[in-house]
Image (cartoon, grey):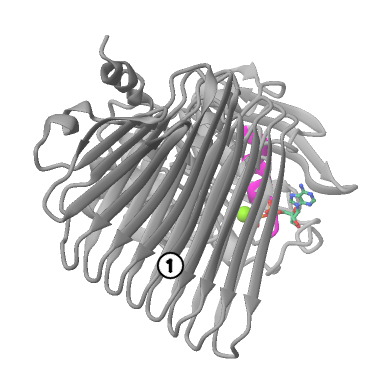
Amino acid sequence: MDLLELRDITFRANGKYILNGLSLTVRYNEVHALLGTNGTGKSTLAYLIMGCSGYKPSSGEILFEGKKINELTLYERAKLGICLAWQEPVRFEGISVRDYISVHNKDIDPAPFLELVGLHPELYLDREVDKTLSGGERKRIELASVLALNPKLAILDEPDSGIDMLSTDDIIRVIEMFKKSGSSVLLITHREEIALISDRASQLCGGRIFYSGEPERVAEMFKSRRCLICDGEVCKDERD
Amino acid sequence: MKEIDELISYTGKTGFEPSVLSDSETAHLVIKAHRVLSYRETEGVKMEARESPDGVELLLSIKEGWKIKKPIHLCFGLLHRRGTQRIKLKALLEKGSSAKFIAHCIFPNAEEVTHIMDADIRVGQDAMMMYSETHYHGVSSGAVVKPKAVVKAERNSRYYTEFNLRDGLVGDLELDYQVLAEEESIVELTAKVFGHKRDQIKIKEGITLKGMNARGLIKTRVALEGNAQAEVIGITEGMAEGARGHVDCMEVVKDNATARAIPVVRVTHPKAKVTHEAAIGSIDRKQLETLMAHGLSPEEAVDTIVKGILR
Ligand SMILES: Nc1ncnc2c1ncn2[C@@H]1O[C@H](COP(=O)(O)OP(=O)(O)O)[C@@H](O)[C@H]1O
Ligand SMILES: [Mg+2]
């Protein structure tokens, strides 16, 4: 049994297929990279797994540890051990970084998690998770908070994108920490060099998984793709 | 129980630390209904009080050049279920002085209680005044509270005020603060109120940036649930070169609550600039989902967001 299994997922919004017959598995303690160009539906897939409002598969099954979770609320899925770090994390007024990282458990010491994402605790613990943080700082804090949560499945939506993004080394360090603590990671990215640090990778294209397997192979295929923006047309006839 | 102890027993709600009453270096003033129960002047701090049938007339002054280190504690309370308390306050911070006031306004048993504060405040040249007040109006929605202040912030002065009502019910609140900001002065007005049930909240704050380079900020945070209603009016007027003003109002609503925000910006000098932002709506869905993804229940998530906004 795999930790997460998506079976033949279809998601339609405004009459348009965004995901169409998507199947994917994430194994226990696996770092699984999901590669895809802008607009292929990577974030949509993340919202479907997390159970965000407005994101219910039109058809298909989401299984977590063998149980179907399609009907569970976001909160119930979080309780099962699923967590999502949004591509653009939201800001909160009046909540300190300290309180944010330990929001689920007041006894946690947030400092080591900040250090892991490259932020000095003494400079950040008492700041607020509000709009005074840069995009990169906010994303780092989000990663720290997900690490502190120790989820079974961490969905990281493009932790490597943004203006002052984390370096590849930073990302590797964070991912290793997830692995060490027993989490699985669904690492969403559109940079093939990031995919290379995964155990397994999948390429999302035309609303389906185009290929799953060796990260090197997937990165290679992704690099040589012929579409810059996904329209589901170019690779339609190539997939298996 | 001594009267003052009885009053103090409620002040935990507003964060009052009773030990300040016995500290000889901390000025304080405790008024219950229309009587002064306790007060202490310290060096540089002068107080005069005159009791009237339904309230107290007060004169507070900070002497020229005195920087008062320890906050001055003021406590206005009415423990009866019915009654009226009228406070007439005249405060003067003389040239170059500075002081921080912490006021506690407590009407814990209010069923039909009216509290009227009429303040006339002058912050002299180069002086600095911080006035932070926290209210507790009990849980029966029976308070009618009307804090009113007319403030003059003179040349190069600082005037910061914070109004907090986050615990218990509000009742009927009509806040009206008007500040005239002269040259190089800085004025910040903050109000944070949590309304429930049938609470009625009216907040009107105005800053007239009359002098060159005067700066003003009006910040309002209101959370509403049940059938509470709020109207927030923030008025900033820029009348001189270099004057800068900003109005920042955020209201979050749940249930059947309704909120209005009316930011008014007026500029009568070409080199003045006033900006505003107002956000009214239900609690942000992405904020909720983010906290739930972190394991908070929907109720805990709402609570955390609202507490943050009102902090
Ligand atoms: N709720 C929605 N309603 C309509 N269109 C949507 C919705 N969510 C996503 N889309 C569209 O689906 C496509 C995929 O978006 P997204 O998942 O954000 O892609 P990615 O994260 O891979 O860049 C985009 O064309 C986007 O505009
Ligand atoms: Mg995306």
Question: Which residue is at 47% across, 28% downward?
Answer: B167
* Residue wearing tag 1: B152
Residue interval drawn in magenta = A39-50
| A121 in the magenta segment | no
* The CB of the residue at mark 1 lies under 8 Å from ligand 1: no
Left/right of residue A24 with respect to residue B207 in the rendered view: right
Q: Classify the position of the N terminus of chain B by image quarter.
A: top left
Q: Position of residue A212 (x, y in %)?
A: 59, 44
B148, B140: nearer the viewer: B148
Classify B21 as above or below A235.
Answer: above
Q: Is residue A237 left or right of residue B174?
A: right
The amino acid sitting under disc 1 is Lys
* Residue B77 in the image: above or below residue A122: above
B43 vs A211, nearest the viewer: B43
| Residue B166 position within the rendered picture, expressed as x and y whole percent measured from the top left | 48, 33
* Ligand 2 location (quadrant): bottom right
